[in-house]
Image (spheres, grey):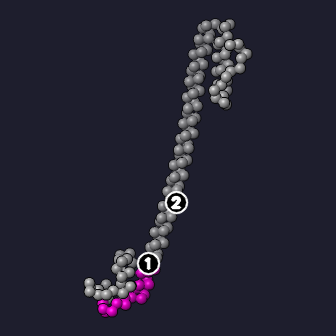
Amino acid sequence: MAVNQEPYFLDPQPTPLDIAVASLRIWCMDTTASATMVAAVTLVLDELATASKAAKLHERLAATHVTAWAAADRSACRAWKQRANLRNRIEDLKARVAAVGKVLEHNGCDCECGHAADDHDDDCERCLACCVSEALGDQL
């Protein structure tokens, strides 16, 4: 290879270090360079290439890490929103049960047996208010 030959890059956007390494590799192939100098430069080039690959790998891993954290953050946000929605729904349902309890308390028991709402025996035919009270139990 001649000294003025253009370097070939596998990476479509080579870094300045890649360009320098490629240029020095072309220079090393020139027959006028001494063998000792070529060996020393080749050793340095190999170390630079390894360092460059490690840096690129580190950049890719860092980008992946950031992407993973962003995805986890979005997932956590969705989970918190769902939790808040569920909590709001539960509060709404508790308010509805409390409203039913107030209506039952206001209207009272209409059973024909004459017992109080809490004193029915198994033979009593219960009114709607007593049935709802019994179904809701401790919720009221």
Q: CA–CA distance between discs 1 and 2?
A: 26 Å
Q: Is residue 17 visible?
A: no
Disc 1: which residue: 98
Q: Horizontal and vertical percent for residue 119?
A: 29, 86
Left or right of 106, for residue 11: right
Task: Tell me the residue at 54%/48% (across/down).
Answer: 71
* Screen quadrant of the N terminus: top right
Q: Quick one: which residue is furthest to the left in this view?
A: 122
Q: Are marks 1 and 2 in contact (CB under 8 Å)?
A: no
Neighbours of disc 1 within 10 Å: few (<14), some (14-19), many (20+): some
Q: Kindly identify which numbered label has been placed on residue 81.
A: 2
**With respect to residue 132, does 12 lie above or below?**
above
Task: Tell me the residue at 37%/77% (across/down).
Answer: 136
**With respect to residue 54, does 72 lie above or below?**
below
Q: Horizontal and vertical percent for residue 40?
A: 59, 13
Q: Is residue 124 visible?
A: yes
Left or right of 83, for residue 29: right
Neighbours of disc 2 within 10 Å: few (<14), some (14-19), many (20+): few
For label 2, the SS is: helix
Q: Identify the mark nearer the N-term, 1 or 2.
A: 2
Q: Is residue 101 magenta?
A: yes
Picture quarter containing residue 102?
bottom left
* Residue type, mark 2 in image: Lys
Task: Tell me the residue at 42%/81% (across/down).
Answer: 101
Q: Nearer the viewer, residue 122 or 71?
A: 122
**With respect to residue 54, does 90 lie above or below?**
below
The magenta-colored residue range is 97-115
* Screen quadrant of the C terminus: bottom left
Q: Horizontal and vertical percent for residue 85?
A: 50, 64
For label 1, the SS is: helix
* Residue type, mark 1 in image: Ala
